[in-house]
Image: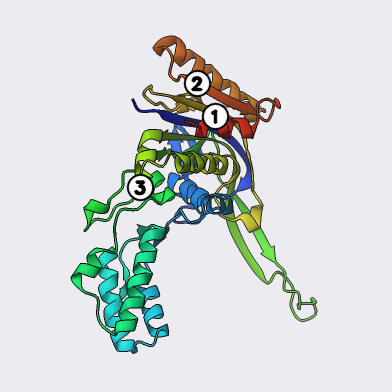
Amino acid sequence: MTTFVQLHLLVSYPPSNLNRDDLGRPKTAKMGGRDRIRVSSQSLKRAWRTSNLFQSALAGHVGTRTKKLGVEALDALKKAGVAEAQAKEWAQKLTGVYGKPRAENLLETETLVHVSPAERASLDTLIARLAAERRAPTDVELDTLLHEQHAVDIAMFGRMVAHRPQWNEDAAVQVAHAVSVHAAGIEDDYFTAVDDLNKGRDETGAGHVGEAGFAAAVLYLYLCVDRDRLEQNLGGDATLTTKALAALVESTLTVGPSGKQNSFASRAYVHYALAEKGPQQPRSLSLAFLRPVDGTDYGRESVARLQKLRDNMEKVYGPCAEQRNEFNVLEGSGTKAELIAFASEA
């Protein structure tokens, strides 16, 4: 029977621009007929998996997502003394393993590929062998570069290798786009920068004038983890599964996207977290915010809305989880440590 771990999180950000659209302004979504601030799931997942917290907790078990493995191969071959023309030819063959090469640069793939530490080691080993033996890679050697692996971030968030589907990985973690619990508009910051060497004698005014979009928001985040799938993706390693879940949960509580941090210092911890476990069909609690929160205390009202919807769904559907743990910073109840232990333990 599948065990699901669900996280429902509320976090308040002051003026910020965490996740930008094509115009450089905060991303939005329309929900309940009102404009909301949105942070994409891609932005959230990248922030978590590349954070110092996640990387250090799972050192040696975190993969690399890149287009540039061929570029690294070329550099390594040249450093080992292989002539540039040969090194380039061999590196292009290696690049083709990971995806279709870009027409303008045959050492980069058109799409990002996520490789595990073990697969990176296989590439390094083959490069060293080719350099020592001064020869091109064989088809058999190329076919061994992608193989069974147990990188935590690939196990969690999956990967697709279109031309080698046998090495695809189904994600064990689903992440919703975060949306503001209230209606929110984007404001513009008109700013100027002064030239330090302009003393106002020969010219006046700013050295630079610009605009930057920003918004403040209380966001609702939702994650669903198929714990059994995660353990399966990690080769049945129960200890690593628990360790991986603990790192993921702590990251979601304390790490946010890094967009425009130097301009806004908009770092925030989750102020309310609800973790649920059980075999029941998962469900988001975003319905709580279909009607936007209003008033003057978004923090507390969003918590109350979330808890009320959770309880009402239990009345209608019966138990939607077997076990729960929560903390509330605004009330000083529960702890981060207890919630992490609850969510990560089998």
Query: Image point 56% across, 27% down: which residue?
Result: 293
Residue 29 at what x, y percent from top left? 44, 40
Residue 341 at what x, y percent from top left? 57, 33
Residue beneath disc 1: 342
Taking depth in this image into account, of 184 and 234 the one nearest to the observer is 234
- The mark that comes first in sequence, 1 or 2, is 2
**Above-or-below relation of 172 to 275:** below
Q: Secondary structure at mark 3?
A: loop
Mark 2 is on which residue type?
Answer: Gln
Circles 1 and 2 in contact, beta carbons < 8 Å: yes
Taking depth in this image into account, of 215 and 56 the one nearest to the observer is 56
- The mark that comes first in sequence, 3 or 1, is 3
Query: Image point 63% across, 34% down: which residue?
Result: 337
11 lies left or right of 165: right
Question: In terms of image quadrants, where is residue 138?
Answer: bottom left
Residue 305 at what x, y percent from top left? 55, 21
Residue beneath disc 3: 158
Mark 1 is on which residue type?
Answer: Phe
Mark 3 is on which residue type?
Answer: Gly
- The mark that comes first in sequence, 3 or 2, is 3
